[in-house]
Amino acid sequence: MRPISLTLQAFGPFKDRVIIDFTKFNQGLFLVSGDTGSGKTSIFDGMVYALYGTSSGDQRGIEDIKSDFSTDEDFCMVEFEFEMNGQQYSIYRAPSQRTLGKRQRVVQFNGEVRLEYRDQIVDKIMEVKAEIEALLGMDEKQFRQIVLLPQGEFQKLLFSDGAQKEQLFRELFKTHDIQALQEDLAQRTRQLKDQLLLVSESLKSGFHRVELTDDQKQLLEHQDYQQVLSQLEKRYQQLETQYQTQQEQTKQENQKLALIQQVNDLLETRQRLEQQQVEHQEQAPSIKAKRTQLEGHQKSKVAQNLTRQLINLQKQAKEHHENLQSQQQRLEEHQKQEPVFLEQLKQAQIQYEQVPKLRVQEKQLGEKIVHAKNVVTQQQQLQDQETTLLTYQNEEKEMIQNLNALSKQIVSLEQTINNHQQTVLLEQPYQQRLRDYEGLKQTQEYHLQSYQSLVNLNQKIKDLWSQKESLLVAQKKALDRYQRHHQAFLHEQYAAISSELKTGQPCPVCGS
């Protein structure tokens, strides 16, 4: 904004009409000087009043704008012409006052404002205010802080120490709200740091409860939690693969056990048929006697009945004999396969005995991974909220899938054990495995409880991090705004001081 002219009438110390032509000062910088009370500040009061309808200082109110030397016959008004972005503007403003009316009688004037530019006239108070603020890009308070420096404050600035200058700047630029915000941000930052320290201690405590290798401990000293977790997860995946393989082998073993059970059933059937064969052989003399008796009584009805009975007995004996031969053939086939089945069962039992050890290792590693995930996840949440939240969601799905699969496997193995509890050969290993799986159930419940605690801690850290980010953004905006205002003020004062420097005279700031 470049001022062109300022017209004051019955304003401040000026009783008569005064016109200040700023076009005579085209050098860029000029000095407004004069004795105390000569009206220097009133020039700036006139500009501010014309633009915003207020005075430039805190000590002057609107009711004090009209000159004390004027009477009701003198009409108070201000007209300010200025140039902005190559366009000229003229604003006229008169305050509410007592003045002479058309009939030369004293009347109450309610005030008037008028803004003219580009053949347009705006004469409503709120519309003029909106136009001026949009044009200059600042309201009345910002205009006074940035463009104007109250009288006498600059001298205090030159000769005050650092603390006084800081306080003076706060008074000049009205940055008390910013100071309060900074103090509040500092307090919240300290609280967040304290909470962060507590979480860090919790992370360290959690890792101390996990059994780690020397390399992993060295990684923890460098706070490389992600690498440690990656190694633990890789080991867990290996055990999980072994467990899946063992489950497949167990399934095959169960199938073999079913075949062996069929063999046992066939053996029992064979024994039963052999017993029946012995019984038939024992009945052979009786049959022979009946046949002899039948030959002696062929012509009698009794002989005929005996003949029919004999034929039936012979038919039954033949059927039993054929059935026995069929069962013997099947038994011989199964007997040929029995050594193979027994050897496979032996190998399967040896492998099956390794399952409890693997489950113990899986349980121990699972506990380590749970603790490690708790620790690393908390640290990761403090570093990157969105990435960590997504990681937790993926881990949640994966953990639930693993737990569901583990539950199904436990139920399946329990059913298998119940089906084969009567098998003497495998009774003790199955009972041992049943106890191991009961332990796995308890481990599963522990995993679920740990996971729920992890979710709760995740939400708490997320909330704290969000608060911290919001406070830091607000603090940065406030500091940036203060620095811009401060730099603008310093540039104007440097220019003003440099224009007053004279060769051979000391600097009014540093004295050199």
Image (cartoon, rainbow, N blue to C red):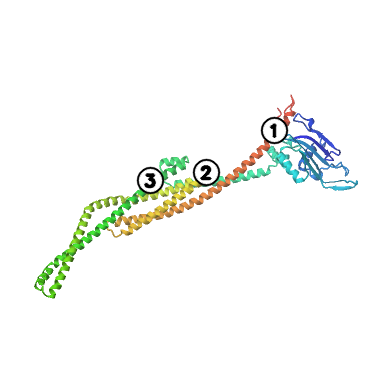
Disc 1 from disc 2: Cα separation: 41 Å
Residue at 11% x, 75% y is: 300
SS for tag 1? helix
Q: Whole-percent x and y of residue 25?
A: 78, 30
Q: Name the residue under label 2.
A: 384
Q: In this view, does 282 lie above or below 6?
A: below
Q: Please tell me in which quadrant of the rendered image residue 148 appears.
A: top right
Tell me if residue 402 can be seen.
Answer: yes
Three-letter amino acid code at the position of disc 1: His
The image's mark for residue 491 is 1
Question: Given the current orientation, which residue lies at the most extreme right position?
Answer: 104
The amino acid sitting under disc 2 is Asp
Q: Name the residue under label 3.
A: 238
Q: Which labelled disc corresponds to residue 30?
A: none
Q: Where is residue 474 in the image (x, y as percent from the top left)?
A: 62, 43
Mark 1 near mark 2, Cβ–Cβ under 8 Å?
A: no
